[in-house]
Image (tube, coloured by chain):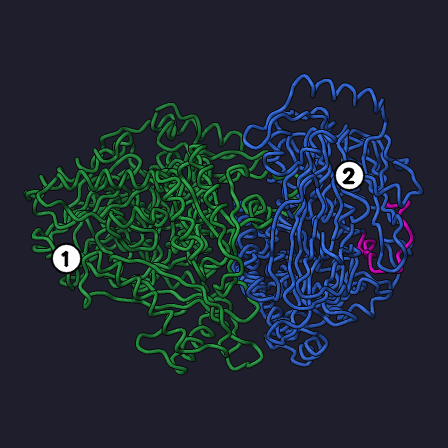
Amino acid sequence: MLVEIVQGSLASIEHEVETAIARTSRSPMIRDAHDFRAGIHDRLLRKLTGRSYSALVHPVARDFPLAEMRPGDVFFHNDVYRSEGGIGHLPDLCVTVPVFAGGRVVAFVQAFGHHDDIGGAVPGSMPSAATSVYEEGLMVPPIRLWDAGTPNRAALAIMTRNSRMPESLAADLDAECSACLMGARRLGELFERYGVEAVEACFDAIIDRTTQTYQREILAKIPVGSWVWEDYAEHDGVDEPMLHTQRITLTRTGPEDPGGERVILDFAGTSPQAKGPINHCGDYSDGVFLKKWLAPILRNLADTPERMAELDVNEGVVPLIEMRFPPKGTLLTPEFPAPTNARTFVILRLLGVLAGVLAKAVDGRMPADQETIRYTGVYGIDLAGRPYLMREVLGGGSGGRYYADGEDTIHVVPDSRNLPTEFTESRFPFVVESLSVAVDSGGPGKFRGGLGYEKQLRMLADAHFMSIADRSILACWGVNGGLAGRPFAVVVDPGGPDERTVDALADAEPVRAGEVIRIRTTGGGGWGDPLERDPALVVRDVRWAKVSSDGARDDYGVVLTGSGDELAYDAGATAALRADRIAERGESEVFFDRGPGYATLADGATHAAVDVR
Amino acid sequence: MTSGPSRAGSLRIGIDTGGTFTDVVAFDEASGALLTTKTPSTPHDPAEGFLAGIDKILAASGAARDAIAAVSHGTTVATNQLLEGHVGRLGFITNTGYESVLEIARQSVPDGYGNSYFWVKPDRIVPRDRVKGVGGRMTWTGDELRPFDVDEARTAAQWFREQGIDTLGVCFLHSYANPAHEQAMRAILAEEHPDAVVSISSEVLREYREYERSMTTLVDAAVKPKVAAYVRRIAHSLEEYADGGVPFYVMKSNGGVLSATEVVNQPISTVLSGPAAGALGAALIASVAGFDRVLTCDGGGTSTDVSVVIDGEPTLTTEGSVGAYPSKIPMIDVVTVGAGGGSIAWLSPEGTLKVGPQSAGADPGPLCYATGGTDVTITDAHVVLGRIPPHLLGGEIPLDVDAARKGIEALAGRLGMSVEETATGVLEISAWNQANALRQITVKRGLDVRDFTLTTFGGSGSLLLCRLMDVLGIPTVLVPPNPGNVSAFGLLTVDVKNDYVQTAVRLATDLDAREVEDLYGGLAERASLALEAEGFAPADRRFVRTADLRYFGQAFEVRVPVPEGPLDAGALDEVAAAFHAEHRTLYGYDFAGDDSQQVEWVNLRVSGIGPLRRPTIRRHEREASASPSRPATPSSRRPVCFDAEQGYEDSGVYDRATLLPGEEVRGPAVIEEYGSTVPIHPGFVARIDTYLNVIVTREDEEK
């Protein structure tokens, strides 16, 4: 009984902390993109809440003995290489508040969020061509930012002095500290009411239950055996585009294994660390951050989408996953001071690599690929002469599933929001001429991939465009006969005299007043053979402007008749066209489709060796 | 205080139509008498039960039809339509280039990280092929960037007519700043598609954020046909009911009422009609009893609604939703939890006990109703423990205690616990679900739940009040008399109220007091015209000004009052000071005195209020203070289990109808009345106050 009560209270406290931060923050990354997380951890540093990822308490506990902590202390860090893998890049500022009961530390409430600017070479602290972490901003190892209720003004002054946006940095830090202190008080009350021993017994039970649930409902779905798959980041901002490999060899052990039934993820075969900022420090503390970051993918193995949504990811998943890292010097084991600000591409991609290798293990019953984080924006001087920086995280389409099409314009981070036109136009010098979905961008499949955005901004003043995006050459893969979606693409002045394509890693592309910037984001991969898609759904997709008439014929083999409200298909002609297509293409063992961009980076190869079933 | 539109009669009637019963309360303005009754609801035609209720209360009061001064009504027509997701065949007209705004929404996936891989988006409120784009564009300042494309507008209107789509929402960008294009669109629709029901966003919600405004406008359009038909049908019946008709008001989600003729033009404002009335009724009762900070807890069969009322004013939100549909119009801030009498206890795949949100409702109902239910419910746990009597509604409906016990035994067997442990466990989880809702609604406003008096009502609202006091540290709980009629009573306690908003984003440093004054003047003028139409003389019209402010860069605003009288720089500074203070209350910090943190004004709001006379709650002739507290006499005794370890304890059972002011009941005990039960746990004491409220406190906190 008490377990339910404790679990309910933890969820409610976490929710309150996040609500308080969301409502008062300034950095658009926190406020709108919701790129921040609260988490509750016990004194053994185990994560208790399960709706999201969070940073780690390990670095704080490493540097500050629990016995010396006092009520009102707030710890702070953002130093990637001193974070035990919990912080991926410097703009993610993390505050940690110890919870006290009976005079000792019993738990922690923590929040970390992506702030506007923490210094470094470019506005926004994400220089795409950085070659060391020193260009990425101010590094703060774990420090005591508040000492028994008293803020350390000197430390705050140093941090705000190093930021281009000192007001929002100060305000957002205040928001995070206040919210965590509030959460710590609430959690303390729970301990006072039921006693430390009883509450900690509940923590054990909460974690054990998760372990058992994953054993029963997830691990049981993976046959004993070993599979390997890989995917790639396409550029690191420094070298010419190339395949930066991330490889997972997944081994599901059986009951007779001396280490017990579990999943072993071996990253051997991952590329050397990049010169540019796409490295991720994954190999600290046995990969405990990455385990919890990747485990949500496992939920796709549960019986129904409803059940998948119910499964929490807390410390209980950790005993079921063993990680094996290659020696130092790879994308996942970079050596200080390798840059990391765009590590998002690598850890996002790893979600897909795990989904892909699982798809091989479970006969394709996993979703096709999605890519939902990239940063696009404009900055300069507005019409009133003030400097501005507008950055937005635009999602993309999700991959087709064995039970449904992918969804349009979604985001992997819960509650990550796009920016309303009525808000951005009032603050920044542009007109959003259209906010739409990119027709044909969803990967064709029996279950089509979801569509990416097509957003068109017309600048009212000269400005610079910036973009930090992957998947502009390679696409979101389709699986089990499904085809890849369309990649990310930015064009300035489309159809105009100065039409030009902008690189996906751009710090400062000049755009003149009056020019339109057209941003298209990635469509999700398709699932299953598009020639098996119900032609009536293809007709609907054309009416809904998700698939073009050409796409209906070329991608799906559907022969349309009529137009407008009379649009339909010719059943006989469709069957004949599809039969021709099937005969034309012959049999194939290739299980994944990476889209046409792959050949350009792979010396003309149509697929990788690991893509065969 | 004057009544607005006057009539000869003095009887004001409140009617709250629920799923099973229609509750009726009548207040005689002349004598101050208050009468209550209930009749069965008639879902096939709610008007039937409505008029039967009026007949019944008139008969009870011995009054004639022309004694009726006004009828106020809380309706769930819009609520139920939205909860059931029946929005019908809608069409949507927006700017060219934004036809996918509903599909895109805000890109957010609900709940957990990684859910984007398996989330299946619910169907959009309007499918893409029934969305038409029309050329023309405004800027955020309300200037015309491109003229309205009349030909495209005409083509779209004709298309909807040809397709037989006759419920339409219109939302153009920046129409909150300049509604001209939306008004032009409506004029063309009136020519080309005269039968269409149309909602335009600048009239529904004059506030920025295009997706939310589009959704709110479409929800308004969706409920308009049904709400209008329903309200008109009752209004029509009332016209014939008495000579010269009967003034008819409908409760709005914002805690005010509006005449039936006007409410059909803004049907979305009725989506929380019922909960708003309950909260306000409870608030008035508590305030008369001497409590001004009140949490209301209205427990029904499937869910419990909680809200916060301070100094008689319910806290409002503009971020509410009903079912799957967000609504940005001001509505009373109610948190609803799936914890009611019918909530089902079940075992998760992990083997742990859970309660709700699934409910057996009234059909098939709890096991003890013996009407086909197969799941253990909250009500079953109560009846097995003896906390409620083995019958409902004062004995009209017997309960099958054995069936409930068998169900709990089976559950207990699977859990390896005793029947009593299982039953108390089910109730404990349910109490925590309610407690978390109460905490959520207070904490998010920076309020401490322990500073509040809890008012519990509704059929199941009072059953767990002692546990809520313990869990939350609440010192006092008040249970009003006739707790089943609080919502109907609440309908008589409110004023006519209309809200007007205008987005006008300005930094405080750039603010021109005269411009702000003019904008407020425009809003007040609209409010005044509406009150005039409601029959309020100029002297009786009240206007409440508020503004939504934020620190530059924030995306959420904090609402603060704007003083009456002419606005000058000093008044504006006063508003900013109030904002700093409120920000500190809500979030624990502010930037008063820090010039680097600029204050920004976002929305200006005016509520136009036409005061109606509130019922007076009479003191009981027997003064509580006349003599020291004395124990009440139980009408019977029975064994009741309040704690599994203690087992069943011999407890007094009290008939509430016979309890008099000054009498007290010490736990373990049960106070029973028609339609509601108040278990008093050991260690708690219930005292009857001079208004016949039950006031529950802890014994160890007695003075």
Can marks 1 and 2 be said to lie on one chain? no
Residue assigned mark 1: B618
Give the labeled residue for mark 2. A477
Residue A414 x %, y %: 61, 50
Q: Chain of mark 1?
A: B
Magenta range: A266-286
| Chain whose colour in the figure is blue | A
Q: Residues within 10 Å of mark 2 (few under 14, many from 20)?
A: many
Name above or below for residue B393 compared with residue B328. above
Residue visible at 55% across and 71% down in the picture: B552
Residue A489 visible somewhere in the drawing: yes
Between marks 1 and 2 in the image, the one whose residue lies nearer the viewer: 2
Instruction: Please report, as a chain letter, where disc 2 is located.
Output: A
Residue B447 vs residue A8: left or right? left
Instruction: Say whether residue A147 is magenta.
Output: no
In the picture, which chain is green? B
Crowd rating for badge 1 (residues with CA inside 10 Å; few <14, some 14–19, many 20+) = few
